Image (tube, rainbow, N blue to C red):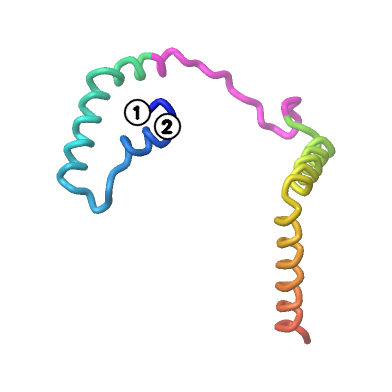
Amino acid sequence: MHAHSNPADFFMKVLTFNYPKTEEDHNKLEVMNANYAKVLEQEVFESNKSIRCPEVDVSPNSRLMASFRTQFNMLMYRNKAIVKREPQAVRSKIYSCLVFGFLEVSLFWH
């Protein structure tokens, strides 16, 4: 890996397999599976056994559930941020809605 390279690109290169798989890809996959089984599998299994998550109450009366007003306000805030950030996308959505609206009206008139 180079000093100024993107780590995600490195991992994508290492973890990518071609389809249809070649003999080299099968060998690479076998080596990766064997190394995982030898080095990490038992540790992952043990750490997963030790994790205990409490049950989450998702009933409508739960105090964890946000009210309709809170959810609506959050959606409006997010949409306002998107409109400020990408006005071109908003214009294109409006134009596409108008075009498809006129198309539907012309198709289903009477």
Nearer to me, 7 or 37: 7
User: Is residue 54 rendered magenta in the image?
Assistant: yes
Q: Quadrant of the N terminus?
A: top left
| Residue 45 percent across, percent down from the top left | 35, 19
Classed neighbour count for the residue bearing mark 2: other residues with Cα under 10 Å, few (<14), some (14–19), many (≥20) = few
**Residue at left offset 44%, top offset 29%:** 4
Quadrant housing residue 30 = top left
**Residue at left offset 18%, top offset 48%:** 22
Numbered mark located on residue 5 in the image: 2
Instruction: Say which element carries label 2.
Output: loop
Nearer to me, 5 or 93: 5
**Residue at left offset 78%, top offset 38%:** 74
Residue behind mark 1: 1
Magenta stretch, residue numbers: 47-64
Nearer to me, 81 or 49: 81
| Residue 5 percent across, percent down from the top left | 42, 32
Q: Is residue 85 above or below residue 108?
A: above
* Type of amino acid under label 1: Met
